[in-house]
Amino acid sequence: MNGALILAAGLSSRMGAFKPLLDLAGKTLIEHVIGHFCLFGCQPILVVTGRDAQLLEDFLTEKFPGRIGFVRNPDYASSDMFASVKLGIKALPADCTGTFLTPADIPLFDAALLAKMAAVPAQVVRPSYKGKAGHPVFLRKSVWSRILSYRGDGGLKGALQTEPQAFVEAAHEGILLDADTPEDFQRLREFLCRMTQ
């Protein structure tokens, strides 16, 4: 059973708005992300919340009744994303054999890509486009203890630096596009518009 962890605890300070609930073609960013994981059949799907946690949890509970679990990062304002990664991994059930991991503001992957990644027999699998690695990352259970025990620099990248990684070529650059800033979000919207024309 493969799960999914969605990181949505950040302050969204550079964006100037709460990123998970930004509208993209009639759906919020995080609805797009969750929709892909649901279509692939991920179970469980956990969202790590922080800023506006209750607002986001209530919204997603209504949109995806019975499908989403939540883990709160109480130190979201002072901790980094890696702290949310650890909280999410700790919350995964014992029968989960792997998990996809992505920030909530990278919505342009799809279920077909997830299937290709899960089929690769490596401990760490990443999508890439023209040599650039993107999201989501697939982490098999065997590397979780390394992540949880890591205390060095570089966050998740540092924790996995000695792990061999496999790459799956994505069909387009959507795996690289996030919404860190208003300019990033505009590029994401324009790219989606081109994709759907």
Image (cartoon, rainbow, N blue to C red):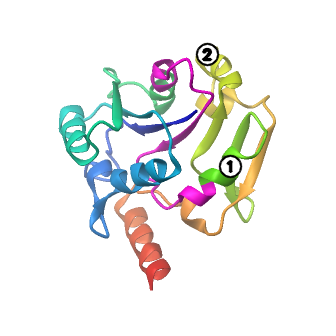
Q: Mark 2 or 1, which is nearer the eye?
A: 1
Q: Was residue 88 drawn as part of the magenta stretch in this picture? A: yes
Q: Nearer the viewer, residue 138 or 82?
A: 138
Q: Was residue 84 drawn as part of the magenta stretch in this picture? A: no
Q: Which residues are magenta?
A: 87-113
Seen at 35% across and 30% down, the residue is: 69
Relative to 141, 69 lies left or right: left
Seen at 41% across and 25% down, the residue is: 79
Q: Amino acid at mark 2?
A: Arg
The residue indicated by pointer 1 is 117
Residues at circles 2 and 1 in contact by the CB criterion of under 8 Å: no
Secondary structure type for disc 1: helix
Seen at 19% across and 32% down, the residue is: 54
Where, by quadrant of the figure, is residue 155 drawn? top right
The vertical placement of 116 against 155, above or below, is: below
Of callouts 2 and 1, which one flags the residue occurring earlier in the amino acid sequence? 1
Mark 1 surroundings: few (<14), some (14-19) or many (≥20) residues within 10 A: many
The residue indicated by pointer 2 is 151
